[in-house]
Image (tube, rainbow, N blue to C red):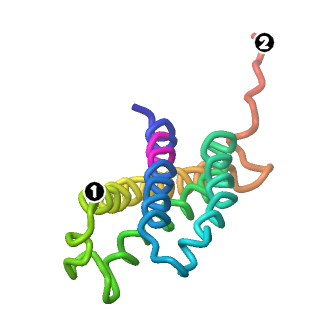
């Protein structure tokens, strides 16, 4: 399978997993917190740019950069939820219902984000490396056919 196709698929999966995660954050939020007030809707424009970069700017430098940044955001979700007093490893999630899907989504986010990060960095690197250095490059000149 081509790397660009795999990158598109993993980036779309990341967007899906993040929407699941943000929905769960909103549903679990305590009354009076920012999440309960709809602060997770701030992610909608970010996810739009990420989706646009994935589908419309694929194989372009800007698309690779957008997917790279999105991968870093996706990789940050499990890290953020593992830290702190109410993190994944404190047992607080087990006391509430629906903890399995929450933790599974974080694991899926982490694995998919790492893979997407590698693929987007590789695509960006090959894109930067594969372009000619200058217009006077000898490889760009076409040989002239001699008639015999």
Residue matched to label 2: 147
Which labelled disc corresponds to residue 104? Answer: 1
**Quadrant in which residue 85 is drawn:** bottom left
Q: Main secondary structure of the magenta part?
A: helix
* Label 2: which secondary element: loop
Which labelled disc corresponds to residue 113? Answer: none
Q: In the displayed structure, would residue 58 be above or below residue 72?
A: above
The answer to which of 36 and 100 lies nearer the viewer is 36
- Which residue sits at x=30%, y=80%? 87
| Tally of numbered tags | 2
Q: Are marks 2 and 1 in contact (CB under 8 Å)?
A: no
Range covered by the magenta-colored residues: 9-13
Q: In the displayed structure, would residue 114 be above or below residue 2?
A: below
Q: Is residue 127 left or right of residue 13?
A: right
Q: In the displayed structure, would residue 6 be above or below residue 24?
A: above
Percent of width and height locating residue 35: 54, 73
Tell me, yes or no, whether the highlighted magenta stretch contains residue 50: no
**Quadrant in which residue 45 is drawn:** bottom right
* Label 1: which secondary element: helix
- Which residue sits at x=45%, y=63%? 27
Q: In the displayed structure, would residue 10 be above or below residue 141?
A: below
> Extreme front residue here?
31
Marked residue nearer the N-terminal end (2 or 1): 1
Quarter of the figure that contains the C terminus: top right
Quarter of the figure that contains the N terminus: top left
**Quadrant in which residue 68 is drawn:** bottom right
Percent of width and height locating residue 76: 44, 72
């Amino acid at each position: 399978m081509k790397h660009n196709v795999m990158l598109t698929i993993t980036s779309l999966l990341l967007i899906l997993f993040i929407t699941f995660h943000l929905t769960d954050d909103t549903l679990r939020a305590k009354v009076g917190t920012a999440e309960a007030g709809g602060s997770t809707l701030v992610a909608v424009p970010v996810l739009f740019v990420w989706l646009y970069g994935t589908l419309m700017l694929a194989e372009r430098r800007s698309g690779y950069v957008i997917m790279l940044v999105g991968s870093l955001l996706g990789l940050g979700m499990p890290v953020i939820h593992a830290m702190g007093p109410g993190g994944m490893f404190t047992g607080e999630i087990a006391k509430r219902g629906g903890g399995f899907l929450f933790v599974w989504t974080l694991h899926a986010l982490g694995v998919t984000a790492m893979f997407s990060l590698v693929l987007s960095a590789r695509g960006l690197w090959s894109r930067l490396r594969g372009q000619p250095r200058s217009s006077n490059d000898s490889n760009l000149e076409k040989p002239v056919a001699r008639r015999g």
